[in-house]
Image (cartoon, rainbow, N blue to C red):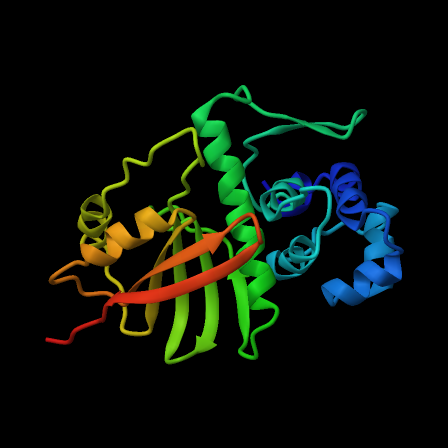
Amino acid sequence: MDIEDQFNKEEFAILLERAKGDRSINQYANEAGVSAAHISRFLRNMIASPPTPETISKFAAKAQNEVSYEDLMVAAGHLARKNELDINSHDRIEKHSPMDVRGKMEQLQRKFIQVILADLYEKPFKWSVEKHEEKYHFSDMILNIDHDGYNRWYLDFKPSIPDRYHPTFQPFFLYGRITTFELNETDKLTIVVNDEKVFNMIMKRPPLSLRANLYIMLIDLEWGKIVKEEKLCGYWKD
């Protein structure tokens, strides 16, 4: 099916209006780094082709009202639909109940993306979001970058639900999966967590012989910022 056939213009316009919030189109455009006229045309359903993932990442980085990168990507037809959107009430209808752990984990992952995108827009190097490739099961987000010798950045999200759910993530399972994929010297892979205890646990248990540039990142979701990122191991040559 052609991508234009999967582009839901009406749904995308509603999401974009929510993302804009009470700001004017010009204010939102200036913050997101996208033409105000371009935003206006999307809001009026005047564009037949969906925005690129890179443009969507700009919309999401400055979005209000909890509109996420994933929401916009689904409406644009770039990602398979996981949630249904009630167009009349503008409310999201989750497949899982509010108490469901999986639903909460997905919500945290969307917040991870927004924090990372917001941080990237402050960086001086070039980057772009790449459409997720199913073959890379160890990553939740893929970026093309030009920084510190890296060309591609894979991010694997391991969120923890504060005060409700104790993470059972064991890094060795991920290390084992990574060994089954061929990574290059210019690839970077980062495990992203929001619990400092998990961060410290992984720092104390780095892989001993993994052929990858592997990092661990700690995100503070309350403040919406990346706290730190440390390298666990480097790519070794034969």
**Hey, which quadrant is residue 35 in on the image?**
bottom right
Residue at figure coordinates x 23%, y 71% from the top left = 234
Asked whether, in this view, residue 237 is left or right of residue 138, the answer is: left
Which is more toward the observer, 79 or 125? 125
Is 112 situated above or below 213? above
Q: Is residue 115 visible?
A: yes
Residue 66 in the image: x percent, y percent? Answer: 67, 42
Left or right: residue 74 versus residue 153 is right
Quarter of the image with the C terminus in it: bottom left
For the point 57% across and 60% down, the residue is 117
Residue 138 visible in the snapshot: no
Camera-side residue: 63 or 4?
63
Residue 218 falls in image quadrant: bottom left
**Residue 189 location in percent, x, y?**
34, 61
Instruction: Estimate the x, y position of residue 123 in percent, counting from the top left.
Output: 56, 74
* Numbered circles on residues, count: 0
* Placement of 42 over or under 82, stated as above or below: below
Q: Nearer the viewer, residue 172 or 211?
A: 172
Q: Which residue is found at the position 84% from the left and 48% from the top?
A: 43
Q: Give the percent coordinates (x, y) of residue 11.
A: 75, 37
Horizontal side of 209 relative to 229 (left or right) equals left
Q: Quadrant of the N terminus?
A: top right
